Image: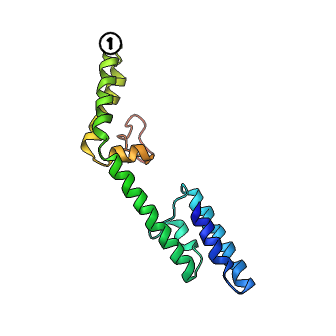
Amino acid sequence: MFFDRDGSREIRKIKSDWQQEQRKEEFETYIKECKKHGNRIPTIPGFPASDAFPQGKDLKNVRNEFVTKQQAIDDLLKQELSGLPAIYILGLDKQIERLKASQDAPAITLIKEEIDSARSNPEYFQNHVLGIAPARKEPPPNRANPPDGE
């Protein structure tokens, strides 16, 4: 991660050994948080690692530079992915045709639901490729076993 390297370089420029050591520990904590979140530099306020970022103008400049680069990469990826949902849906339609021969109705139903999701939400396919789980619909409560107090 180049951000790690550039941040460490800025820390080494600090004249005071005590402040350098303190910033190094803070920065290492911040990098661990970034790694926990897919090596992504947090850009969202309130994100756990945002508060862990060490104070210091030069480090903030390094962070801002890498956040800008990260955003540009994300934007390019989303642009590249934007043309692919139609191909994804076509592949799912072909899978349905193959499954009709084996009369696998439950699988066909699941694939049709996937197609509906991809058609109804433009970001669904992008999130699917990026590993972002869709919001789950809560199943209706099981009335056979009502919660206590009912």
- Front residue of 66/140: it is 66
Q: Residues within 10 Å of mark 1 (few under 14, many from 20)?
A: few
Q: Residue at x 57, y 61 (%)?
A: 34
Number of numbered labels in the structure image:
1
Residue 103 horizontal/vertical position (percent): 33, 14
How far from the left and from the top, in percent, is residue 136?
Answer: 38, 45
| Residue in view at x 69 percent, y 79 percent | 22
The vertical placement of 122 against 25, above or below, is above
Spot the residue most to the bottom: 16
Residue 69 lies in quadrant: bottom left
- The picture places residue 11, in percent across and down from the top left corner, at 65, 77
Identify the secondary structure beneath mark 1: helix
Residue carrying label 1: 101
Residue 76, given in percent of the width and then of the height, sits at 37, 55
At x 37%, y 57%, the residue is 75
Is residue 117 something one can see in this rendering? no
Q: Nearer the viewer, residue 110 or 125?
A: 125
Image quarter for residue 84? top left
* Observer able to see residue 29: yes
> Quick check: 135 above or below 108?
below
- Disc 1 residue type? Ala
Which of the image's four quarters has the C terminus? top left
